[in-house]
Amino acid sequence: MSILPYLVAGWLFLVGLYGIVTSRNYVHAIGCLTVIQSSTYVLLLSVGYRSGLGAPIFSDHPPGPAADPVLQALVLTDIVVGAAVSALLLSLALQLQKKRGSINPDDLQPARD
């Protein structure tokens, strides 16, 4: 068992978190949020990986030792949810640009409507 995937997941999380904290643009912050989300993919896949286990497909051979398909399904669900959240946040940033003329958090004033 290697510690490298866990280090990669931690590094991706820290890089994304640093990007969000120092971001001066909402689109950049959304991109950094997707980097943080990719760290969860690496973490889930590294938790479910076992050396020597086959794919959990038993149609052509009898059941034997196989990788846990639940973690693979969680990663696929995580990817779909991440894409949906990113699309929603980018559409909100686009509407903010149209309504207020900027996506820089420092330039925005509270709404007065």
Image (spheres, rainbow, N blue to C red):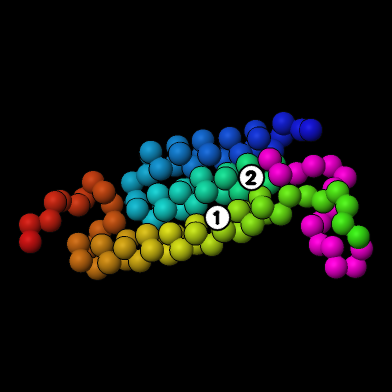
Q: Amino acid at mark 1?
A: Asp
- Residue at horizontal 72%, vertical 31%? 3
- Residue at horizontal 45%, vertical 37%? 18
Where is 79 relative to 44, above or below? below
Q: Choose between 38 and 44: the one closer to the eye.
A: 44
Answer whether labels 2 and 1 touch (C-beta < 8 Å).
yes
Residue 69's x, y, as percent? 71, 54
Q: Amino acid at mark 2?
A: Leu
State the SS at label 2.
helix
Q: Is 50 contained in the magenta span?
A: yes
- What mark, if any, has residue 13 been given in the picture? none
Q: Is 42 contained in the magenta span?
A: no
Q: Which label's residue is closer to the chain start, 2 or 1?
A: 2
Q: Quadrant of the N terminus?
A: top right
Q: CA distance from mark 2 to mark 1?
A: 10 Å
Judging by the rendered image, the residue that carries numbered circle 2 is 44
- Residue range in magenta is 47-61
Q: Choose between 49 and 66: the one closer to the eye.
A: 66
90 left or right of 109 in image: right
Q: Residue furthest left?
A: 112
- Residue at horizontal 38%, vertical 38%? 21
Residue 106's x, y, as percent? 23, 46
Q: Residues within 10 Å of mark 1 (few under 14, many from 20)?
A: some
- What mark, if any, has residue 78 been given in the picture? 1
- Residue at horizontal 44%, vertical 59%? 86
Q: Residue furthest front?
A: 62
Q: Residues within 10 Å of mark 2 (few under 14, many from 20)?
A: some
Residue 29's x, y, as percent? 40, 49
State the SS at label 1.
helix
